Image (cartoon, helix red, strand yellow):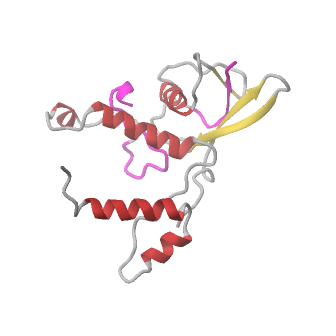
């Protein structure tokens, strides 16, 4: 069930090459409920490495500023020579539970045993990079029915060597004492 994450995208990110005004594709995302212009700009902060703040324009040439207006589907051009947003829930695929745009429950956030904000930031960065960069990272099958050839499916899938290494170390880590 591995597929390209880019197929269902309805927001596309381009870089404008000032020398010849060519648009170079950078990535995109599937727009889900609750994603605002501020969320989009924070995602771009993760996706792009720039020496200064960049200008982002929609297909009409209007600048997209960091505000709480809903992000609209379409083409966005980057012109460059949410822990950070109240623990807001951001979806990168269809939100079947309709919780996108809401914040994490305050009971979790107030619990002293909760994950640190650095873990939430790391997870958000990984989600942005996996879902928005280029054509997106391949989606890996996680649900193998009983009797299926898990090894064969992994070896036939994308990034087979890296995936096998991950699966091996993930399973061995539970049987190894860490000193």
Q: Quadrant of residue 84?
A: top left
Residue 123: give x, y in percent of width and height. 38, 40
Residue 170: give x, y in percent of width and height. 33, 60
Q: Is residue 89 magenta?
A: yes
Between 2 and 90, the one lying in front of the other is 2
Residue in view at x 49 percent, y 39 percent: 128
Which residue in the rendered view is the most extreme toward the front? 179
Between 67 and 145, the one lying in front of the other is 145
Q: How many marks?
A: 0
Which residue in the rendered view is the most extreme toward the right? 20
Q: Quadrant of residue 62?
A: top right
Residue 77: give x, y in percent of width and height. 69, 28
Please determine whether, in this image, residue 33 is positioned above or below residue 157: above
Mostly what secondary structure, the magenta segment? loop
Residue in view at x 40 percent, y 73 percent: 144
Q: Is residue 113 magenta?
A: no
- Image position of 133 (left or right of 68): right
Which residue in the rendered view is the most extreme toward the top? 52
- The magenta stretch is 72-99
- Image position of 154 (left or right of 143): right
Which residue in the rendered view is the most extreme toward the bottom? 147
Residue in view at x 55 percent, y 67 percent: 157
Please determine whether, in this image, residue 69 is positioned above or below residue 89: above
Between 109 and 117, the one lying in front of the other is 117
Residue in view at x 48 percent, y 29 percent: 39
- Image position of 74 (left or right of 29): right
Residue 8: give x, y in percent of width and height. 60, 52
């Amino acid at each position: 069930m591995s597929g390209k994450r880019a197929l269902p995208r309805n927001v596309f990110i381009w870089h404008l090459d000032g020398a010849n005004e060519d648009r170079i594709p950078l990535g995109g995302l599937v727009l889900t409920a609750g994603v605002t212009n501020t969320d989009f700009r924070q995602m771009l902060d993760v996706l792009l490495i720039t020496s200064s703040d960049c200008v982002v324009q929609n297909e009409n040439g209007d600048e997209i500023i960091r505000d709480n207006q809903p992000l609209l589907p379409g083409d966005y051009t980057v012109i460059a020579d949410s822990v950070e947003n109240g623990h807001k829930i951001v979806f990168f695929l269809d939100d079947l539970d309709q919780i996108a745009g809401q914040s994490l429950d305050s009971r979790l956030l107030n619990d002293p045993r909760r994950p640190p904000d650095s873990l939430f930031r790391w997870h958000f960065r990984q989600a942005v990079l996996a879902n928005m960069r280029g054509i997106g990272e391949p989606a890996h099958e996680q649900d193998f029915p009983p009797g299926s050839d898990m090894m064969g499916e992994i070896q036939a899938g994308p990034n087979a060597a890296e995936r096998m290494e991950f699966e091996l170390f993930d399973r061995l880590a539970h049987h190894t004492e860490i000193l």
